[in-house]
Amino acid sequence: MTGVKSSDWLTDDEKHMIQKCINGDAYYEKKLYRLYVQAMCSRAVRMIGEEESAKDALQDAFIEVFKSLPKFRGECTLGAWIKKIVVHTCLKYQKQNKMISIENINKVAELDNQYEPDEQLITEMTCIHYAIKLLPDGCRNILNLYLLEGYQHQEIANIMNISESTSKTQYKRAKMILREYLKANRNK
């Protein structure tokens, strides 16, 4: 019988759920999906920057989760393992979908033209969130992984197949771009 090895990271209920999913039990597959989809959706949206594309990537990630469950060894929490798959899937999705749609460019231009913090009731966090979405993919991914997901630069380097110094440089670049954007838009 395949299944999760003994693990200090997993409860007996999680082990049972994983085994049921491996055996193709739709009830437990739905249960696992519902347990993690919301948190993973937030991560996907932060990484990809556009909600519909993030949902597509998330669906691909969960397909990979269910396909890979027999290989899960319980060496970390189930959530951490799923998060790693989501991160890799989002990065892969970005590489495969490097198209820049005119519609998205027009949305950004329209929002830039409308953005007047003194006239609108926009919170600082909304402005920061918007600015993060405008970052180039590499900068946004590294900023999200380092600042929001808590990965270290060496881990990011391994995940993204880049050097540690590239991760650090992209992170510094992301902070610089954000700072410049926020400074420019505070004075409007």
Image (cartoon, helix red, strand yellow):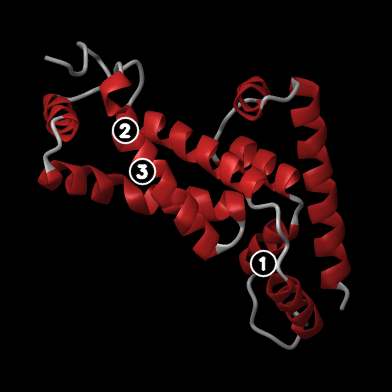
The amino acid marked with disc number 3 is: Phe
The amino acid marked with disc number 2 is: Lys
Residue 111 place in picture, x, y as percent: 73, 79
Q: Give the residue at mark 1.
A: 124
Q: Residue at horizontal 34%, vertical 15%? A: 75
Using the numbered discs, state the Cα–Cα distance from disc 2 to disc 1 in whole angstroms: 41 Å
Query: SS class of the residue under badge 3?
Result: helix
Q: Residue at horizontal 28%, vertical 28%? A: 69
Position of 98 with respect to 155 (left or right) is: right
* 128 up-or-down from 159: above or below: below
Q: Residues within 10 Å of mark 3 (few under 14, many from 20)?
A: many
Query: SS class of the residue under badge 1?
Result: helix
Query: SS class of the residue under badge 2?
Result: helix
Residue 187 place in picture, x, y as percent: 88, 74
Q: Quadrant of residue 164?
A: top right
* 175 up-or-down from 73: above or below: below
Position of 78 with respect to 91 (left or right) is: left
Say which mark, if any, is on residue 62: 3
Q: Residues within 10 Å of mark 2 (few under 14, many from 20)?
A: few
Using the numbered discs, state the Cα–Cα distance from disc 2 to disc 3 in whole angstroms: 8 Å
Disc nearer the start of the sequence (1/3): 3
Disc nearer the start of the sequence (2/1): 2
Q: Tell me the quadrant of the picture where the N terminus can be found.
A: top left
Say which mark, if any, is on residue 67: 2
Residue 56 place in picture, x, y as percent: 47, 56
Number of the front mark, 1 or 3: 3
The amino acid marked with disc number 1 is: Glu
